[in-house]
Image (cartoon, grey):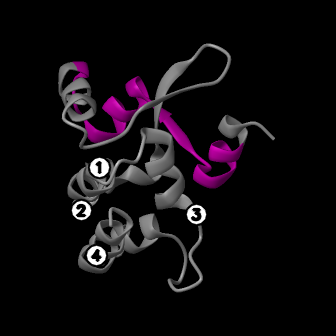
Amino acid sequence: MNQNADLDALVGEWLTLPDLMEALGADLREVRRLVDVRAVIAVRRGENKVKSVPADFVDNGRVVDALGGTLTVLLDAGFEDDEALRWLFTPDESLPGTPMQALREGRKTEIRRRAQALGW
């Protein structure tokens, strides 16, 4: 299995940037800013290498509140984009689910603490 297939299996559903625009009710400039400031991670996927973000990054028409800060912690710890996505979407036996699920449930302190520990 190649790395992209592995990431696809972990993440599940993806949104292209136009799909993200629709999900957020935003224009392309706003969506590109979210990618540029690393509030979301967009990776190139598929045969056409279309920039896409995990659909779980969006909750009720907004980017999950704790996501941007958590991504900052992971990227500051030296994670590449695909590594940060793998960490967020890999099931963790000590959590009920994945770190991303915990963020969506509002458990940012616990997840950021775990992410910070990765940098040591």
Q: What element carries label 4?
A: helix
Determine contact: label 3, label 1, CB under 8 Å: no
Residue 63 x/y as whole percent:
27, 50
Which numbered disc covers residue 66?
A: 2
Q: Are marks 4 and 1 in contact (CB under 8 Å)?
A: no
The residue to which callout 3 is attached is 90
Q: Residue 33's quadrant in the figure?
A: top left
Q: Nearer the viewer, mark 3 or mark 4?
A: 4
Does residue 106 appear in the picture of this structure?
no
| Label 2 element class | loop
Give the overall secondary structure of the magenta segment.
Answer: helix
Q: How far apart are marks 2 and 3 (CA)?
A: 18 Å
For the point 40% across and 74% down, the residue is 102
Q: Residue furthest right?
A: 1
Task: Tell me where residue 4 sits by quadrant.
Answer: top right
**Disc 4 target residue:** 113
Could you tell me the amino acid type at mark 4?
A: Arg
Q: Is residue 10 magenta?
A: yes
Instruction: Looking at the image, tell me whether mark 4 or mark 2 is earlier in sequence order.
Output: 2
**Which comes sooner in the sequence, label 4 or label 1?**
1
**Foreground: 18 or 70?**
70
Residue 100 seen in this snapshot: yes
Residue at x 46%, y 59% (from the top left corner): 88
